[in-house]
Amino acid sequence: MSLPSVNLPDAAHLQLAVCDYPEHVPQDRWKDYARQQKALGLSYVRIAEFAWALMEPTEGQYEWAWLDQAIADIAAAGLKVVLCTPTATPPAWLTRTYPETMPYDHEGRLREFGSRRHYDFASPVYREHSRRITRAMAERYGAHPAVAGWQTDNEFGCHDTARSWGGASAAAFPGWLQARYGDVQALNEAWGNAFWSMDYQSWDQIRPPNLLITDVNPSHLLDFYRFASDTVKSFQEEQVAILRELSPGRFVTHNFMIFESGFDHYEVAKGLDFVSWDNYPTGMLEHFSGWGSDDIKTRYARTGHPDFISFQHDLYRGLLHRPIWVMEQQCGQVNWAPYNPLPADGAVQLWTAQAWAHGTDVVSYFRWRAATMAQEVMHSGLLRHEETPDRGFAEVQALDLNQFPSGAVTAKVALLHDYESLWLYDVQKHAASLSYWAQTVSYYAALRGLGQDVDIVHPDSDLSGYAVIVAPALTLMTPERAAHLEEAAAHARVVFGPRSAYRTVSGRTPEDGQPGVLAGLLGSKLLNFDSLRPGLSVRVEGPDHAVDVTTWAESYRLNPAARNGAEAVYSYSDGPQQGQAAVVRHGNVTVIGAHSEELIRTVLAGELKAAGLKAELLPEGVRLSRRAGKTLVQNWNQAEVTYAGQKLAPVSFVVKND
Amino acid sequence: MSLPSVNLPDAAHLQLAVCDYPEHVPQDRWKDYARQQKALGLSYVRIAEFAWALMEPTEGQYEWAWLDQAIADIAAAGLKVVLCTPTATPPAWLTRTYPETMPYDHEGRLREFGSRRHYDFASPVYREHSRRITRAMAERYGAHPAVAGWQTDNEFGCHDTARSWGGASAAAFPGWLQARYGDVQALNEAWGNAFWSMDYQSWDQIRPPNLLITDVNPSHLLDFYRFASDTVKSFQEEQVAILRELSPGRFVTHNFMIFESGFDHYEVAKGLDFVSWDNYPTGMLEHFSGWGSDDIKTRYARTGHPDFISFQHDLYRGLLHRPIWVMEQQCGQVNWAPYNPLPADGAVQLWTAQAWAHGTDVVSYFRWRAATMAQEVMHSGLLRHEETPDRGFAEVQALDLNQFPSGAVTAKVALLHDYESLWLYDVQKHAASLSYWAQTVSYYAALRGLGQDVDIVHPDSDLSGYAVIVAPALTLMTPERAAHLEEAAAHARVVFGPRSAYRTVSGRTPEDGQPGVLAGLLGSKLLNFDSLRPGLSVRVEGPDHAVDVTTWAESYRLNPAARNGAEAVYSYSDGPQQGQAAVVRHGNVTVIGAHSEELIRTVLAGELKAAGLKAELLPEGVRLSRRAGKTLVQNWNQAEVTYAGQKLAPVSFVVKND
Amino acid sequence: MSLPSVNLPDAAHLQLAVCDYPEHVPQDRWKDYARQQKALGLSYVRIAEFAWALMEPTEGQYEWAWLDQAIADIAAAGLKVVLCTPTATPPAWLTRTYPETMPYDHEGRLREFGSRRHYDFASPVYREHSRRITRAMAERYGAHPAVAGWQTDNEFGCHDTARSWGGASAAAFPGWLQARYGDVQALNEAWGNAFWSMDYQSWDQIRPPNLLITDVNPSHLLDFYRFASDTVKSFQEEQVAILRELSPGRFVTHNFMIFESGFDHYEVAKGLDFVSWDNYPTGMLEHFSGWGSDDIKTRYARTGHPDFISFQHDLYRGLLHRPIWVMEQQCGQVNWAPYNPLPADGAVQLWTAQAWAHGTDVVSYFRWRAATMAQEVMHSGLLRHEETPDRGFAEVQALDLNQFPSGAVTAKVALLHDYESLWLYDVQKHAASLSYWAQTVSYYAALRGLGQDVDIVHPDSDLSGYAVIVAPALTLMTPERAAHLEEAAAHARVVFGPRSAYRTVSGRTPEDGQPGVLAGLLGSKLLNFDSLRPGLSVRVEGPDHAVDVTTWAESYRLNPAARNGAEAVYSYSDGPQQGQAAVVRHGNVTVIGAHSEELIRTVLAGELKAAGLKAELLPEGVRLSRRAGKTLVQNWNQAEVTYAGQKLAPVSFVVKND
């Protein structure tokens, strides 16, 4: 599917929006709300993503009057509408009439109606209803002048719903495998099924890899995850095709969710006009950041961690290499983390400014008025339950949008990320407290702490524009990918993290050992890897200093055939790998085998310098982000700091011209 | 059902009893045991609550000879019998013949036979058997001169059995909803089902709210909990009606369980003559008190925490505003907590004295002889396995019952408690380490630490006799309840805790914001609430001092329309709510928005003083309880303390005349 | 089944072996691998335990060519083969054609194909296939000159598979009970089913004791565990009978797994020629040793804990009182613990030497080449993925086997162990942080720390040769066992730990209290037991010193009828049991009622001395093990230590002549 280039909204500077739910309040509020929204300086209102039961109260009987009116009221106030397909919440009648549309969880349990996302992406019956309601909406509103664009569904994969471990998905999985492998013996070989007598003789013997006695075959899991990801992708493509047909000139996007890992976002984003995501900084830190220490969680409880947030911005901007939207932006407390603190004064402005600086064209606050019913009554909105402006409202009102011009984010540093590597890494973590995200974010945060702008991109994408390329955890390697990286290394400094190229395309290890086809580029081969429980550490010594390493330590032997000669920049000075190389540099390419924030920062600083980039070690909580000729200087601390001779108020920002 | 007033046992002072299981020992022991029990000074023996399989070994064939004899032997020794309906343990033949009587757990699993409480309260088939065995027992023993009264079933709800999440309960739930709402659209509106497209079109679409993809709609949960509570209530009513018919003049009670929250105890207690409960102080602290710190759990490991225990006494006494029984009183180690320490020397006496002082007329020790078989062999009794007196026996023997006269507990302080508020609070705690019980017990413990006697009563009950009324966590508010509290505030000081009136009768929030219909009384409206992870705190400043607040902090704006003028007694001096009111006083009414033991104690001390009550800050572990003109001075410490010039031995009490 | 005495391999010294998987690598590697294995000094290669799907790709069609060749290549290199029945991994066709062979887990879920051990031992259908494939293999290879012997299946019980909680096991359980009890009323009496009305009227009412509402009847559990254990036993016996018939002169063994508790190893070992087990020291410490403190886990992370490892050696040697094999010996990192560190330099040699000293005749390293596919790609082998020698290879190569002569381990100390006691102890731990293994290993480690060699033997076995007999946790006691121990005490010092003789053969408590039939021998009876949460301790005073006791404290009254007079050696000096005996000595017999490493060590040191054994307190991490006139002096520390005037390098050993 080729990318349409037309339907991107265009504006001179950042625009604002809000998520609103006319169906949650009496109709007499609608006009007033729209007027207030316009007065606040908003441009768009997103509606209807959970309103299926109201659009189609019983099967095949549509009720559009209320939505006609809601759109009319919004349009009358001078606002544009973002409409959503409502497929994240199939109505009760659908679920009860067609129970075969329901998903199974990893424990093998059929899930129940009563919240949201209760469907199996693979269900042909559900897909029929998905297409039908999409078509019905698009027919009615596709050409409406107030409708600027569409959001498909809502937060694919949220609540661990990208995969169903039974039912329709279980039925569809063998067919997907047959299409991929053709012959069942090819699958047995690819998966290494000889290992525990796991060979299959026919496709119908194969099921999702759950309820096992012990560990899963990672190849089985990898293909099941790929199948589920492809299923999400094709589910959305069906909706997009209908929207393209019936709503020409309007954009289509999807709001992706924080650190969601249930599908390959690069694949699922294809065919969208731009990517959007849902930005909840405090919930992200408290709930999603399994690797954050309690110290960090407490320090940044009221703002979120700047690097965790900007990681998402940079990740989603990199899916299509285009500006993004924040489709849902926290503007007060959330309700779904174990603890849900009030944001600090200034946090809503800081989040908005940061979003802009990382390539966001529209920030849409969630939500207009706090819900007075159901699951999210403890969640904030711009208005309180009682309809008075809440704390975030005033911050939004005070924003001067002219300081946030449109334009490009131009990063000279690329960070490589790949969902298949993530799946393979995490199924066999080998050291419980490290994970793909934890390792990847460590490298990202080091770069941000050195003042760098970063593009997070797929390893197989165009890398020609970058001076430094960092691959923190590129577990899966293919010959094509290796060749692509070799090309990149011809013009850029390239840094790899541990576990690089541990696995082949089918999830096996290279027959010639790690890093397999990457050995030439790295100038070295893996000797051993060491998994360190909390309390256990080893020491690494380099040119100037020594550092303690926790969690992970791998070692290398230099490849005598390396073209330009490889050198051990750091080596272990104690432990079982004493004397072995921990960091190897081979021409432009460096591999860091040991996990240590200090080591990562030091090596990256050297590589940035070698690439001619300016790298400065920023104070804790101070961050720089650049866009359109401006630099956003941010203070994420709840105390004043002085940076570059300038006092920065707590939780604040300054926009400076470059 | 109106409350009969006749069947209350009457005695000049505290009486003692024991739980015995003749079916667990050879018949040649029965007469001896009864003689020993009488010699120990006991008055009652409770029997037969788990003996169904012996009364009715196969369906419809009763064997009464053994029970005839057991009752005769007890009676012959001059003791009275408390008989139990045996429905807590349906026999194997019942479960196997009628599997439709079995319950489902929250995970959707059908539960199995092999322990106890394996039935669904909603099962019509089980109810038929419940009525049949109750009638059979009542016909045979209802008029027996030695039978003083009845206990229904045993510990309703224990082991999370108040609710069955499938089977008969799932089948009955829609009918209950139809009876409550009449029209399914009324239910949709009450539950706010528009929120996530959760509208129902017919009653049969509705199921228990488990196995969901993500959070439950609190309104859905609230009504399912109400349904389950009503089902427990009607289950018991069927037994009570039969007992009233066939056993005139005998009391009927039920032994409620520590902190059990699966049903509305106020409703289920209606129709009983008096309430009893099962008092296991060490297990209560170790197992049920999720909020107790490890320090407190270790400090009071051998006595239980005095306030946790007396909270139960006061709670159960308040269900019917009558003296209570302790139907099962720990008299040695229990077996069901993660750790089961031996009670300290003196603890059995202290527990007994405390029970008396809080309105207990009969204390029944669990159990006579330690069981030599099955699940509870590690549990103690008054006798060891080997039939020698265990540690508790000597303490019981040494008790002088004359020091514990019958009479009234007359408290001037009421603490309001409501199970619906509990359910709503806990389904959306918002701060993981706080809960309804934790918050409620904090206020209660503060009052006890200030030397107050406390009635724990339902918010809708008669509040006319109280000088101070404390509502720690009255989450659910209705217009009628608000009016009732306004009346009470005309003559009493009233103190509210955080999250007061957050929710309406159907579990939504007030459309005009919190505290909705209570805003006039409080003289203020809610601004924000702040959820504080461990390590995060805010500071509150008041007239004399400042305190640190953890876990929860909410703020208010004063209501300019408040009749007598409201004042911010404490305000936040840092954090996002800096400058906002944390404690508001409006005439007689105070609301405390921040969670801090010190703040609660300080505000309550002021209110007690303002109400003309004497409040003194008691030393750690020292408690006072008053009944019938006596004051029980208690030392719960395992060290001697001096209080009011008097030395108190470790784990001991003194009865003083007022 | 009588024990054949013929099929034991005989050699002058320790021999080495390796686990290899020809089916995992291309056939062109086989000859080379065999040659390299021979050159490394190996004698045996174990193969084929997971190769069923390759031997029988579809039902009834065998493919032997590859295995013929694999065996031929091994034989050609001068190595012997250990062949395995492949029943640990039924192929997909079997599982899909005969789903009734699949097991259920404790949560009632049917398990799925995709890893290993997915079968129910009780399935008659699976047993038919087990016999068929065993016969097919034995017919083809039973008389092959290169085949030295057989391993049945693989690691019975691993991954909690000894018991299936539904399906075939549920169907077979009632019949097993009927055979044991004859009459259902006898079962009701044995189980104490009167307790909670749990009496059965017919066998078919009885099911496995899972999915219960609350605690299980320990008698129900005990018999279900016995049933499962007997089922494992008879499953293996069917294979052994076929192997005896068709493979005369070859040994049959089974590789038992670390701390596996799902069946009675004494029973299942009967009929084998010798016992083998799988020794993974680092994984054992990190994963299986629930009771190890974090300090110990970190200190010994790279070597495993010496006493945990030797406990296994001594346990398995004691099953048949014969030398053992280590069938799988870790020789690099494992992959299945939360953390999987690299072993320290020297650890592979130290593990090998320790194995020899504790009675191992053959050590077989797992595995030859690290797997390049599936579940265990992160596990090490002697060769890396890339086929170069890994760290362990060099250590094996450098071993001088002549220093490890064959011969007897002659221990004067016996430690009594019994799986039924384990099951009863752990079902009612009463103090969450103590368990049967934790208590038992505490006593064992104390003995090892005092320099003793220890036989771990069944309490009912021949005890005549021992000077000191230690029974750390002999929970289950019968009159016969008590008489046997009385006989032993006539010639040996006997030490009991807490909870001795708490339970009868059916899991009840003695009617005359603990320790029932053992009271005469102990010269005392139990008064009370005290369960101590972390932070709670009591103090015990003895002749010379006082110690703090944590977790468990029980007290005794001296038996006035004791023949030789009993004395309280230690008594409690505080807490509820103040003044009561904590340690009682009665002639040759001592019972230790309090849990304290120091107390255990002190009492045991005294008993060893009294028995005329030399006991010295070894330095931390230093251990002595004796075999065949040699003493293996071991240093398990990662630092040099001086012991007996000799410097010991980190992680090393010295073999000394006695």
Image (spheres, coloured by chain):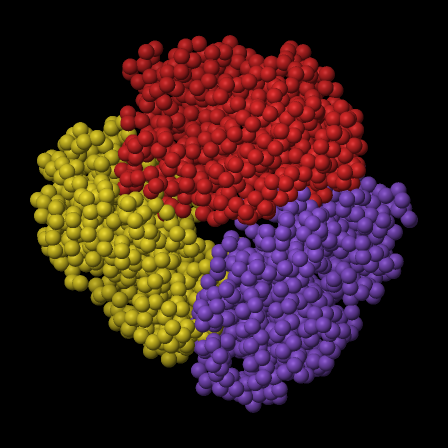
Chain colours: A red, B purple, C yellow
Screen quadrant of the C terminus of chain A: top right
Report the residue that reaches farthest toward the right.
B564
Report the residue that reaches farthest toward the front.
A61
State the residue in front, C601 or B165.
B165
- Residue at 59%, 35% in the rendered image: A133
Q: Is residue C462 visible to the viewer in this orientation of the structure?
A: yes
Q: Quadrant of residue B309?
A: bottom right
Q: In the rendered picture of this protein, how many numbered marks are placed on residues?
A: 0
Q: Is residue B468 left or right of residue A436?
A: right
Q: Is residue C380 visible to the viewer in this orientation of the structure?
A: no
Where's residue B432, x and y in %? 62, 46
- Residue at 38%, 58% in the rendered image: C166
State the residue in front, A171 or C207.
A171
Where's residue A24, x and y in %? 71, 40
Q: From this view, report whether residue C287 is shown above or below residue A281.
A: below
Q: From this view, report whether residue B455 is shown above or below residue B499.
A: below
- Residue at 49%, 48% in the rendered image: A110
Q: From this view, report whether residue C176 is shown above or below residue B78.
A: above
Where's residue A299, x and y in %? 62, 33
- Residue at 62%, 29% in the rendered image: A139
